[in-house]
């Protein structure tokens, strides 16, 4: 089984669910749903008919449709989501933005802002460049998977840092808080563990949440 087909771990599930205060009568969009493993996780908490998936890969799209989810294929060159304003309570975007060309990246942020409800929550995860490459080097020698880690993913066409993500998201969202998922030596050096949020700029990957900012004309 490939990593992106494996069920979500209990630890990851807890990390995601902690940012979701309610589950009754809510709607959720998984943008970049893949084979549906996060959709399956969310369906444990949210009525399946209220869960939507967006995926561009035809095989993945066919699979999640077969599982009974509402799903669609986004138009890559036209970042417009086929939903009315303020439709979703939650939007989940994990390990997707780095695959979206920079010229479209902020347009999708604008679309997420449009379709999410007032004070809705966007859950977001991504690699943290350029520090990700240092972690790749460490993992290459630790696992002996040199080719996998030393050659960066060629589909990562939008290699942004956590500082850039925080700045860009604040134009559309409030309470932007992206936590580091891993910092070197944090399990061995207590001062790093105790200050992990302050040291988030040096993390491998990030995950967290932000709430919709209410725009006043």
Image: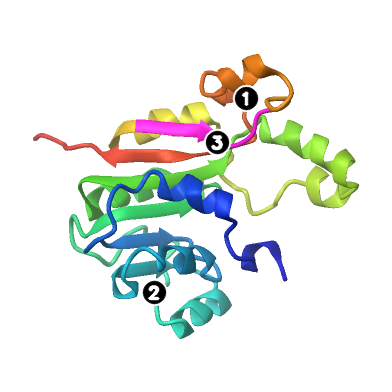
Q: Which residue is mark 2?
A: 71
Disc 3 element: loop
- Which of pointers 3 and 2 lies earlier in the amino acid sequence? 2
The residue range painted magenta reads 176-183
Residue 135 visible in the displayed image: yes
Q: Position of residue 90 (x, y in %)?
A: 31, 53
Q: Is residue 100 above or below residue 136?
A: below
Is 192 on the left or on the right of 160, as rendered? right
Residue at the spot x=63%, y=14% of the render?
191
Q: Is residue 155 above or below residue 177?
A: below
Tell me the crowding category of disc 3: few under 14, some 14 to 19, or many 20 or more residues within 10 angstroms, Cα based.
Answer: some
Residues under numbered marks 3 and 2 in contact, where contact means CB atoms less than 8 Å apart: no
Label ID, residue 202: 1
Q: Is residue 84 magenta?
A: no
Tell me the crowding category of disc 1: few under 14, some 14 to 19, or many 20 or more residues within 10 angstroms, Cα based.
Answer: many
Foreground pick, 77 / 190? 190
Q: Is residue 46 above or below residue 103?
A: below
Residues under numbered marks 1 and 3 in contact, where contact means CB atoms less than 8 Å apart: no
Q: Which residue is mark 3?
A: 160
Q: Position of residue 108 (x, y in %)?
A: 37, 50
Foreground pick, 65 / 12? 12
Residue at the spot x=46%, y=34% of the render?
178
- Which of pointers 2 and 1 lies earlier in the amino acid sequence? 2
């Amino acid at each position: 089984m490939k990593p992106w087909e494996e069920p979500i771990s209990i630890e990851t599930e807890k990390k995601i669910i902690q940012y979701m205060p309610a589950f009754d009568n809510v709607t959720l969009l998984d943008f970049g749903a893949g084979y549906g493993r996060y959709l399956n996780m969310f369906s444990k908490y949210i009525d399946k008919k209220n869960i939507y998936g967006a995926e561009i890969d035809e095989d993945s799209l066919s699979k999640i449709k077969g599982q009974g989810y509402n799903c669609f294929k986004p138009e890559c060159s036209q970042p417009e989501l086929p939903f009315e304003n303020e439709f979703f309570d939650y939007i989940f975007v994990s390990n997707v933005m780095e695959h979206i060309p920079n010229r479209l990246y902020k347009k999708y942020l604008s679309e997420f802002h449009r379709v999410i409800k007032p004070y809705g929550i966007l859950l977001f995860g991504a690699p943290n460049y350029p520090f990700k490459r240092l972690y790749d080097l460490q993992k290459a020698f630790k696992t002996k998977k040199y080719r996998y880690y030393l050659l960066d993913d060629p589909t990562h066409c939008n290699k942004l840092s956590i500082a850039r993500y925080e700045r860009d998201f604040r134009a559309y969202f409030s309470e932007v808080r992206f936590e580091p998922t891993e910092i070197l030596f944090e399990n061995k050096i207590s001062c790093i563990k105790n200050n992990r949020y302050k040291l988030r700029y040096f993390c491998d990957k990030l995950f967290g949440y932000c709430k919709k900012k209410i725009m006043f004309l």
